[in-house]
Amino acid sequence: MSSQQLDLVAYEGDSYELVGVRGVGLFDPAAHGIQTVAPHTGCWRGFIARYEVRAHRLHLRSLSIWSERPMPPLFGVERTGASTDDGAARPPSDLDPGGRIEGEYAFDEAPVAFTGGLLLGREFVGQGYRTMGSDPPWLYATVHDLTFEDGWLVDSIDRSAEMASARARASREGDDEEPVRSAGATHPVVLDRATRGRRPASPTRWKGKGRGRKG
């Protein structure tokens, strides 16, 4: 089985993986009446979002999403290849062998009213593969800690030096390849573990992301 493929965030000209989340307001299919299905084990939640920080504001840039039912317009944008008549017969090419409909959306203007923190990572420097859970953020060479209020960027901290120190410490302790066996990690817990080398008190504290690499 594979981990959930991570969402992406474009920030200051680079593409980052969304490795930690604390807060509310990111894209939620249920809020738009969409019941998702997993197209494969690498996308068990049924969608992959791509965000962008533009002019100090968080936007949803594009979306891949799967469902067994017709999908509505999102932020005024129709699903790629979809008919505007939801009652119309859909061509066989619209369905995959499992009967799922794939929705692809690209947005020019879809601001996201997120409040909380996002932990972004790029340049993965770890070794090996995970089958489930979240990669520790110190396994990324570049890490940014962004804070938003109602979708507006209010603070940004470069955590790369802290992650390098944590990576060196984890390597000395033989823990640089320890998988986090859970659904993922919330932003403050994963950052606390990375910067202080502490283990979470309980797996139930973890909620978040995996890289989507197959085991």
Image (cartoon, rainbow, N blue to C red):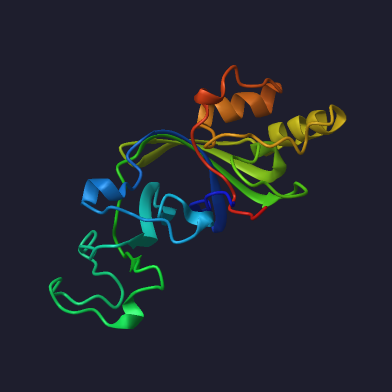
Any part of residue 191 in sight: yes
Any part of residue 102 in sight: no
Give the residue at x 23% y 59%: 75
Judge left or right: residue 68 versus residue 4.
Answer: left
Location of residue 29 in the rendering, given as x and y in whole percent from the top left corner: 30, 50
Q: Nearer the viewer, residue 36 or 192?
A: 36
Location of residue 9 in the rendering, given as x and y in whole percent from the top left corner: 49, 52
Location of residue 19 in the rendering, given as x and y in whole percent from the top left corner: 55, 42
Residue 196, above or below 166: above
- The outermost residue toward the front is 98
Give the residue at x 81% y 28%: 169
Q: Nearer the viewer, residue 53 or 63?
A: 63
Judge left or right: residue 28 versus residue 188.
Answer: left
Q: Nearer the viewer, residue 118 or 65?
A: 65
Location of residue 32 in the rendering, given as x and y in whole percent from the top left corner: 22, 51
Judge left or right: residue 214 versus residue 41.
Answer: right
Residue 202, above or below 27: above
Q: Quadrant of residue 83?
A: bottom left
Numbered-mark total: 0
Give the residue at x 35% y 41%: 152
Residue 149, above or below 192: below
